[in-house]
Amino acid sequence: MVYMAVGNDKKENQNQREKFVAYCAKHPEEKLVGFSDYTTLCLMCVEEVAAQKKLEEQKIVEDIEQVLSPEETQKLLAWAADLAARTGFSENECILRAAIMKAMRCEETVENFVKNIIEKRTVLSLLKNGG
């Protein structure tokens, strides 16, 4: 994802890191969501990829679940159920959207991000807060 940063107020930030408001280059009206690891993403971009991947959603989740230990599967499903209850998305949608967001923040494709989860046989990269 390419983005541009605009607007810093040096007076207010002389003794602090300069603050920027970032916007998506593809959706210039959309402010980017920032994370504690200094990565950003555009929610409109997430929505677009989620719509494109909707038909693959079940397979992606099944592919992940097939390689996980019972403990990892339980952790993933509990996390997805909690998120689904709070967002109104299905558990599979929550897992797919998390994979999309992490892939975007790591600047890789969803396919490569999921492949990495499958190869490592852990969902830690999906569930942790950092990059």
Image (cartoon, rainbow, N blue to C red):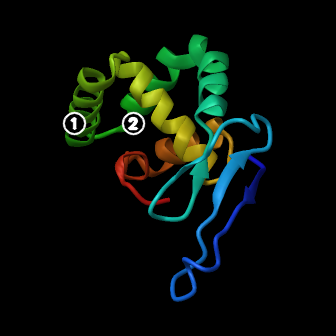
Is the C-beta separation of discs 1 and 2 under 8 Å? no
Residue 82 quadrant: top left
Q: What is the distance, in whole Å, between disc 1 and disc 2 at their CAs? A: 9 Å
Estimate the x, y position of residue 38 in percent, counting from the top left: 54, 64
Q: Relative to residue 46, is residue 58 depicted above or below?
A: above
Q: Residue at x 20, y 41 (%)?
A: 71
Q: Amino acid at mark 2?
A: Val
Residue 17 quadrant: bottom right
Estimate the x, y position of residue 4 in percent, counting from the top left: 77, 55
- The label on residue 50 is none
**Residue 68 falls left or right of residue 81:** right
Q: Residues within 10 Å of mark 2 (few under 14, many from 20)?
A: some
**Residue placed furthest toward the front:** 11
**Residue placed furthest toward the bottom:** 15
**Residue placed furthest toward the top:** 55
**Residue 84 falls left or right of residue 17:** left
Estimate the x, y position of residue 46 in percent, counting from the top left: 60, 31
Estimate the x, y position of residue 36 in percent, counting from the top left: 44, 63
Q: Relative to residue 14, is residue 40 depicted above or below?
A: above
Q: Residue at x 48, y 28 (%)?
A: 96
- Residue closer to the observer: 72 or 28: 28
- Residue closer to the observer: 87 or 12: 12
Q: Residue at x 48, y 45 (%)?
A: 117
Q: Residues within 10 Å of mark 1 (few under 14, many from 20)?
A: few
**Residue 71 falls left or right of residue 27:** left
SS of the residue under disc 1: helix
- The label on residue 67 is 2
Which residue has dot 1 on it? Answer: 70
Q: Relative to residue 108, is residue 89 depicted above or below?
A: above
Q: Residue at x 26, y 29 (%)?
A: 77
SS of the residue under disc 2: helix
Q: Amino acid at mark 1?
A: Pro
